[in-house]
Amino acid sequence: MTQITNHNSETPSFATAARIWVLIGFTSFGGAAGQIAMMHRMLVDERKWIDEQRFLHALSYCTLLPGPEAQQLATYIGWLMHGVRGGLFAGLMFVIPGALIMLGLSFVYVYGQHVPIIIGLFFGIKTAVLAIVAHAIARIARSSFKTKLLVAISIVAFLLLFFFNAAFPVLVLGVALCAYAAQPFSPEAFGPTTSVADVPSQAAPWRATFMSIFVWALVWWVPVIAVAFLLGPQHILTEIGVFFSKLAMLSFGGAYALLAWLAQEAVAVKGWVSAAEMADGLGLAETTPGPTILVTQHIGFLAAWRLPAPFSQPVAAALGAMMTVWATFAPSFLWIFAGAPHIERMRSNLRLTAALTAITAVVVGVMSYLAVWFGLHLLFAEAGWLQFGLLRLPVVNVATVDWRAVVLSALAFVLVMRLHWSLTRVVGVMSVLGALSLAF
């Protein structure tokens, strides 16, 4: 659980880093791709607090984990810079602002209120996110594509995801295993073969690892067990805690990979929400900062709203949302604080490095897929898929194109790609323009 010093970059003070984590927490729109792009821009490009290689290594590991990879990446980087307190603060600040906003929007949702200016602000932010994601994809691709094989892996990953809806966990694991096995036979295919100089020489202490597992498993499960003891194992809050804890262990591939399972369990089996309400929750999650997987918070909110006893509806709904967020995100701290020290000390292992490098190439393909998916739904009111057996093709209704989104997105691309404006400046300007565009 000790801090690993980042020798290649100047580590900021904890107070300085804390301010940036709070800023990221309130401005991390656009789902995992947008949030990874934002952290890359703010931490690697603008402030150089962490070097490119360390960022991509951490991203590759987090991609292998269940749960929200962007929040885990923030936790990992915070831990790299300031140990456990840094990781804990970064991980919490990545979630709390979005969770609070989502809670407020859920109350607005059930009481049937609408705030047009807020809708406009989020609309403008979405157009900024599209440009920011595209810029991050280009930056990460330039730094990680050391060989033609890595380029090919990224392209194939994009094609399999986009046209064949490939299972993300299977794709990542398959590529990692192939790269791990192939590295001794073709080491140059995965980039430089020299070991990393600043990797700690001593093995990570297993006693500390087991202590981390024990402590963070306790932190994860104590609230769920306490609720079960106080309210009973059949109470809705207990069911929410257990259900979303299972989800946290199985949620590979991000929020969108979970939609089918969520629809089956939360809608068809448990009847907590309707399909339309789940879709509305996804829309709310997409317009708030923080992970898109906060859609689960809306589901937990509505489930407790409908079964509030012995509380009032507002209190029960707020507790349901809090339990959902806890069960969804608490496990991430276990995965990072127990696993990251070992991953850092294995950076000199060339076979593991090859596997993680290949995963980074897959991540570029995944981010490209998410950027295209996000762009289609931003620019067109009607966008979907045509299925031909295993093959699927995107289809849009050209008549539903949103010209305001087209114009604002083009402007955001100019600000980011050509004028190289800072992230916060772009987001601020585009949010104001988004509000103005919907007002007229």
Image (spheres, grey):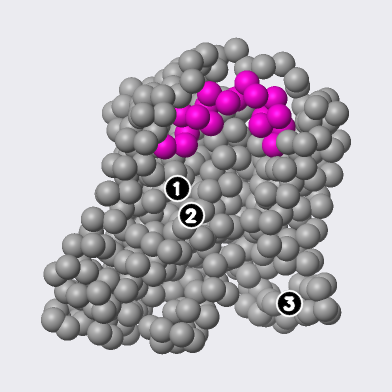
Give the secondary structure at mark 1. Answer: helix
The structure residue drawn at horizontal position 48% and vertical position 71%, both measured from the top left corner, is 282
Q: Is residue 423 left or right of residue 388?
A: left
Query: Which dot marks residue 358?
Result: none
Give the secondary structure at mark 3. Answer: strand
Q: As shown in the figure, which amino acid type bears the numbered disc 2?
A: Gly
| Disc 1 from disc 3: Cα separation | 30 Å
In this rendering, the answer to whether 253 lies above or below 104 is: above
Q: As shown in the figure, which amino acid type bears the numbered disc 3?
A: Trp
Query: Which dot marks residue 71?
Result: 1
Please give the count of numbered marks on the rendered protein: 3
Q: Are marks 2 and 1 in contact (CB under 8 Å)?
A: yes
| Disc 2 from disc 1: Cα separation | 9 Å
Q: As shown in the figure, which amino acid type bears the numbered disc 1?
A: Gln
Q: Is residue 82 left or right of residue 411?
A: left
**Mark positioned earlier in the residue sequence (3 or 2):** 2
- The residue indicated by pointer 3 is 385
In this rendering, the answer to whether 52 lies above or below 413 is: above
Q: Main secondary structure of the magenta part?
A: helix
- The residue indicated by pointer 2 is 67
